[in-house]
Amino acid sequence: MRFTRIFVDSPLQIGVSLTLPAASTRHVTQVLRLAVDDPLILFNGDGHDYPARLIRLQRDAATVLVEQSSEPEPQTPLQIHLALGISKGERMEYALQKAVELGVGRLTPLFAERTQVRLEGVRLERRLEHWRGIVIGACEQSGRRRLPTLDPAMTLEHWLADTSEGGLLLDPCAPLALTGLPAPVAGVTLLIGPEGGLTVREREQAMGRGFQGVRLGPRILRTETAPLAAIAVIQALWGDFVQ
């Protein structure tokens, strides 16, 4: 039996009841149509699942009782950091959602020279909050008990200036294939551009900061496809796909 998983941004403790957030209440009552005594699972990103039970339903409030705490989610053997050029609408949402499902631990949205989306101020804050909802929803669906880090959006130039770790730059023209690399020691940072890719200047900047160009194969992939294919290969080679 598959239980409903709900994220709550608050401490959870066995034997303690709490009222679900408004959006979660609507989902539980109007979409799933759960009833009193129905089970569900709560998580808050601390690594545990908390099996719970609905004990009260009102028009605009659902109260649950935490009954158990699971074992902590095992730590991944490979931390993956995806730095992704911001793309339009559903493309960005799809890439973020599937990257979380595939096990990425950190996400950094980047404004690059060819980024076609212009966001700032309140609009940017709202978009970041929307992306955070995408990340949480992907964790709810995939069973992840720890939330990936979603960094504030920044320019690629600013991000490169602050990073010293280097990483992999996905480039269809690179001479080296991703599958030809040795296993990373602890983690890997994957840099991928927006629609149209990174410019020559941006690729040179990345190389100057220790990034190595790698290719996936003979085809040029869309910005929402490329990170997912690369992450899947990385997880199969060195990550938790082999467990």
Image (cartoon, rainbow, N blue to C red):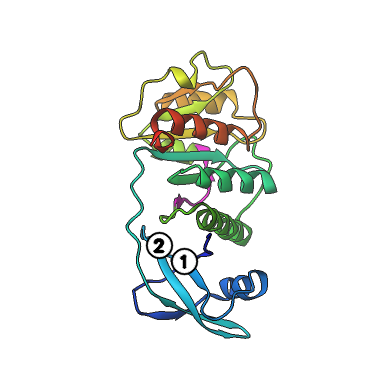
Q: Are marks 2 and 1 in contact (CB under 8 Å)?
A: yes
Query: Splitting the image into 4 quarters, where does residue 200 fall?
Result: top right
Q: Amino acid at mark 2?
A: Asp
Q: Which residue is mark 1?
A: 41
Q: Is residue 151 magenta?
A: yes
- Examine the rendered structure and indicate whether residue 167 appears above or below residue 99: above
User: Regarding mark 1 in the picture, which secondary structure is present there?
Assistant: strand
Question: Residue 129, position in %: x, y?
Answer: 56, 60
Question: Residue 100, position in %: x, y?
Answer: 51, 47
Q: Which residue is mark 2?
A: 49
Question: Residue 158, position in %: x, y?
Answer: 47, 41
Q: Residues within 10 Å of mark 2 (few under 14, many from 20)?
A: many
Residue furthest front as drawn: 1
Q: Earlier in the sequence, mark 2 or mark 1?
A: 1
Query: Splitting the image into 4 quarters, where does residue 126 fall?
Result: bottom right
Who is closer to the viewer here, 146 or 69? 69
Q: Residue at x 57, y 71 (%)?
A: 24
Who is closer to the viewer here, 112 or 47? 47
Q: Amino acid at mark 1?
A: Ile
Q: Which residues are magenta?
A: 148-156
Question: Residue 189, position in %: x, y?
Answer: 43, 35
Query: Splitting the image into 4 quarters, where does residue 186 fall?
Result: top left
Q: Residues within 10 Å of mark 1 (few under 14, many from 20)?
A: many
Q: Is residue 83 left or right of residue 122?
A: left
- Examine the rendered structure and indicate whether residue 36 appears above or below residue 138: below
- Examine the rendered structure and indicate whether residue 174 appears above or below residue 59: above
Q: Residue at x 39, y 30 (%)?
A: 238
